[in-house]
Image (spheres, rainbow, N blue to C red):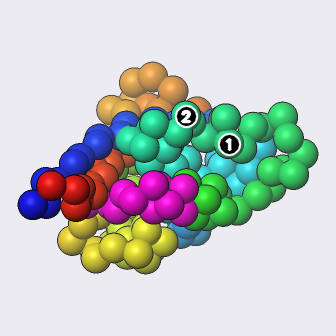
Amino acid sequence: MTSPEYRIGLGHDRHRLVAGRKLLLGGVEVPFELGLDGHSDADVLLHAITDALLGAAGLGDIGDWFPNTDPQWAGADSTVFLQAALSAVKERGWQVVNLDCTIHAERPKLSPHKAAIKNNVARLLGVLEDQVNVKAKTGEKVGAVGRLEAIDADAVVLLGRSDTAN
C-alpha cells in the first residue's frame, strides 16, 4: 500500500534596489533602471524558492548552504543555488507538487513578465507550468518596497513522496 507524505516549505527574501545592477527575477532579466544588490546575482525570487525547498526537506536555509561570506558565491548565478537545493530534495525522495510565489515590487510593473518568470521557474524545477504560480504585488507606496528601496519575494512549496512500505 502506498501512502503519500507531504511537506510544506516557506521561503522569503529581500534585496535592496540599486543603480548599476541587472534586475533578475526567477532567472529572467526584467528591464528596469535599478537592479538588486547582493553577494550573488541577488535574484530574490530564486533565493526565496531555494529557501522554501530546503526548509520543506528540513535542510536548513540558503545561508547555511551558500553563505554570503564565502567568496566562491560572489556574483554567482542563483540558478546554481536552486539546482543544488532541488537536487538535495530529490536525493531524499521528494518531488515538487506545487509552488506558489509572490514578488513584492512597487516598480517595475511585473504583469508583462509574470508568464516568462513562471515558465522559467517551472523549467528550472522540472515541473509543469500549472504546478507553479507567480503573483506580483506593489507596496502601495508603504515601507521599503513602496519607497523603491527593495524588492521582496515569498515562496511556498509543497513537496511529496510516496512511501512504498506496507
Instruction: Please give the residue where the numbered disc 1 appears in the rendered image.
Output: 65
Q: Quadrant of the N terminus?
A: bottom left
Q: Residue furthest front?
A: 166
Range drawn in magenta: 86-98
Q: Secondary structure at mark 1?
A: helix
Q: Position of residue 154 (x, y in %)?
A: 39, 41
- The type of residue carrying mark 2 is Gly
Please, what secondary structure does the residue beneath circle 2 have? Answer: loop
Q: CA distance from mark 2 to mark 1?
A: 8 Å
Q: Which mark is residue 159?
A: none
Quick one: label 2 or label 1, which is nearer the N terminus?
Answer: 2
Percent from the top left, x then y, of residue 127?
33, 73
**What residue is drawn where x is 66% and y is 35%?**
63
Give 93 or 165, whichever is nearer the viewer.
165
Left or right: where 70 falls relative to 83: right
Residue farthest toward the right in the current orientation of the protein:
71
Q: Residue drawn at (45%, 62%), measured in percent from left and top? A: 90
| Residue 24 is at least partly visible in this image | no
Task: Please say if 121 is above or below 103.
Answer: below
| Residue 144 pos. (x, y %) | 51, 27
**Quarter of the figure that contains the C terminus:** bottom left
Mark 1 Cα within 10 Å, few/some/many (few <14, many 20+)? Answer: some
Magenta segment: does it hold 69? Answer: no
Q: Which residue was labeled with disc 2?
A: 60
Q: Residue at x 13, y 60 (%)?
A: 2
